[in-house]
Image (cartoon, rainbow, N blue to C red):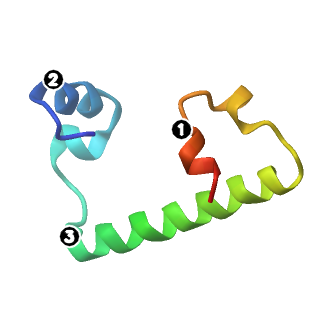
């Protein structure tokens, strides 16, 4: 999402000091993918737990596809 376009990068860099100055720690592709996968699994478990308690997730997150909720 961040690098999908130059405009996106510029917009995000206004909010993130690390992007603005390009300072900070370098993260490898593997580290980023590992973090993203862990974050995805954590969020997936959270949403599934909400579903198990009959919480209507689509009222709060209407952008989710119904296919995603059928897991």
Q: Which residue is drawn at the image coordinates 49% and 70% (left, top)? A: 38
Q: Is residue 17 above or below residue 15?
A: below
Residue bearing the label numbered 1: 65
* Quarter of image, res 25: bottom left
Give the position of the C terminus as an image quadrant: bottom right
Q: Helix or strand or loop: what does disc 2 sit on?
A: helix
Q: Helix or strand or loop: what does disc 1 sit on?
A: loop
Q: CA distance from mark 2 to mark 3?
A: 23 Å
Residue bearing the label numbered 2: 7
* Quarter of image, res 27: bottom left
Which one is earlier in the sequence, the residue at label 2 or at label 3? 2
Q: CA distance from mark 1 to mark 2?
A: 27 Å
Q: Which residue is drawn at the image coordinates 55% and 37% (left, top)? A: 64
> Which is more toward the observer, 28 or 49?
49
Give the position of the N terminus as an image quadrant: top left
Crowding at label 1, few (<14), some or many (≥20) Cα neighbours within 10 Å?
A: few
């Amino acid at each position: 999402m961040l690098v999908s376009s130059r405009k996106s990068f510029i917009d995000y860099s206004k909010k993130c000091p690390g992007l603005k100055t390009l300072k900070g720690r370098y993260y490898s592709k593997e580290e980023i993918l590992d973090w993203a996968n862990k974050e995805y699994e954590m969020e997936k478990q959270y949403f599934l737990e909400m579903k198990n308690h009959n919480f209507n997730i689509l009222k709060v997150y209407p952008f989710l596809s119904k296919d995603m909720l059928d897991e």
